[in-house]
Image (cartoon, rainbow, N blue to C red):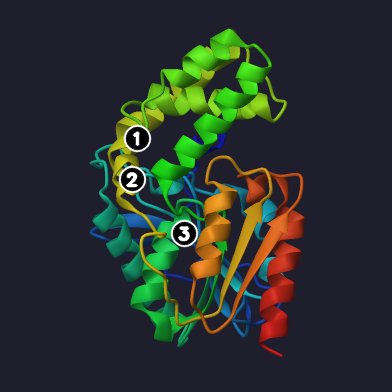
């Protein structure tokens, strides 16, 4: 959660390619504010214009990643034109007067950006790489604009938030009952699912971390709570909307190649539910990849492995 709050450093440019750093005539490294959904939103672009176009949809909601681009997509940028988008209210698209966005607003923003990028780069198709919350937008775009999609890579997808959190809480309670950690069990049993307030989220986050061997003492947890409280004001209304999403209710049919990456230790978006979703998914081509020794934060902790895997999948697909 601490990665949700990134120092804001706004870089303005004039025109889409106004700040290009050029090694060759087709190389591009630029930033831009684009008017999407009636407000200025930040995008960062790097790659070669002759390569396929890729849009990276960050997680959260609210966890913009353009500031971490060098870590998250540096390898991908050698093979694709990679676009990072700081979604409204996040990262460099932060606006102090912005109302908390709804799910429908975020989906509309994603549609507008998609169409803008296709037109700007004169491309018919785009590759989507979506992480966590970003998969909600990625699935939406894949279903609505299949003819404009080259493929979809979904990392730690959100399948059924409520069921996922219930499974995780049950697993944690059983674990701490066995360890006779009474306080942990007491806190976990106090959680309301669906989350009613951000404290529910924070408590589960704390014991997921502890379960994985990262203990958060009370003093540090109080610091975390400040971050959670700031996040709550902007994002909790949207987060509660995510409980309406259930990709297990019906068989999902994607008309594009779909690749799913999951961490074998993921307790934030249940790996069991992701596997169940994958088995029922209908697509012209689909593959499921397990990453070892990692939970939900694949782009942060397994970036190089993630990128090399995506390159192997997509570049071999196009041969």
Query: What residue lies at 56% left-to-right and 37% top-to-bottom?
Result: 3
Q: Please tell me whether mark 1 sits on a helix, a strand or a loop.
A: loop
Q: Please tell me whether mark 2 sits on a helix, a strand or a loop.
A: helix
Q: Indicate the position of residue 42 as horizontal and vertical percent values.
A: 42, 56
Question: Which is more toward the observer, 176 or 205?
Answer: 176
Question: Which is more toward the observer, 224 or 180?
Answer: 180
Q: Is residue 60 above or below residue 223?
A: below
- Can the viewer see residue 116 in this picture? no
Could you say which disc has been placed on residue 194 in the image? 1
Query: Which label's residue is closer to the chain start, 2 or 1?
Result: 1
**What is the CA distance from the residue labelled 3 to the residue labelled 2?**
14 Å
Occupied quadrant, residue 221:
top right
Tell me the residue that label 3 is attached to.
135
Q: Is residue 201 above or below residue 263?
A: above
Could you say which disc has been placed on residue 243 in the image? 2
Query: What residue lies at 50% left-to-right and 53% top-to-bottom?
Result: 58
Q: Indicate the position of residue 195 as horizontal and vertical percent values.
A: 36, 31
Q: Please tell me whether mark 3 sits on a helix, a strand or a loop.
A: helix
Side of 143 relative to 37 (left or right): right
The residue carrying pointer 3 sits among few (fewer than 14), some (14 to 19) or many (20 or more) residues within 10 Å by Cα, namely: many
């Amino acid at each position: 959660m601490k990665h949700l709050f990134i120092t804001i450093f706004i870089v303005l440019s004039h025109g889409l390619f106004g700040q290009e750093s050029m090694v060759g005539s087709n190389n591009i490294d630029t930033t831009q504010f684009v008017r999407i959904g009636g407000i200025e939103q930040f995008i960062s672009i790097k790659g070669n214009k002759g390569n396929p176009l890729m849009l990276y949809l960050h997680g959260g909601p609210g966890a913009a990643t353009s500031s971490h681009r060098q870590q998250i997509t540096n390898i991908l940028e050698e093979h694709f034109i990679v676009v990072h988008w700081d979604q409204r209210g996040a990262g460099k698209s932060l606006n102090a007067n912005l109302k908390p966005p709804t799910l429908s607003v975020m989906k509309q923003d994603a549609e507008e950006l998609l169409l803008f990028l296709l037109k700007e780069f004169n491309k018919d198709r785009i590759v989507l790489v979506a992480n966590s919350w970003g998969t909600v937008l990625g699935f939406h775009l894949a279903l609505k604009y299949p003819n404009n999609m080259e493929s979809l890579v979904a990392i730690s997808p959100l399948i059924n938030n409520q069921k996922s959190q219930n499974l995780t809480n049950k697993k944690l309670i059983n674990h701490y009952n066995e360890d006779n950690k009474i306080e942990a069990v007491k806190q976990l049993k106090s959680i309301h699912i669906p989350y009613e307030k951000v404290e529910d989220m924070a408590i589960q986050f704390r014991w997921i971390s502890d379960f994985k061997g990262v203990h958060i003492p009370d003093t540090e947890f109080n610091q975390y709570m400040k971050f959670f409280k700031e996040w709550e004001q902007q994002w909790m209304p949207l987060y509660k909307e995510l409980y309406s999403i259930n990709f297990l209710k019906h068989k999902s049919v994607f008309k594009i190649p779909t690749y799913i990456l999951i961490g074998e230790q993921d307790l934030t978006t249940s790996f069991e539910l992701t596997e169940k979703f994958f088995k029922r998914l209908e697509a012209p081509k689909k593959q499921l990849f397990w990453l070892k020794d990692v939970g939900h934060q694949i782009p942060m902790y397994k970036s190089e492995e993630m990128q090399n895997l995506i390159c192997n999948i997509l570049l071999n697909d196009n041969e």
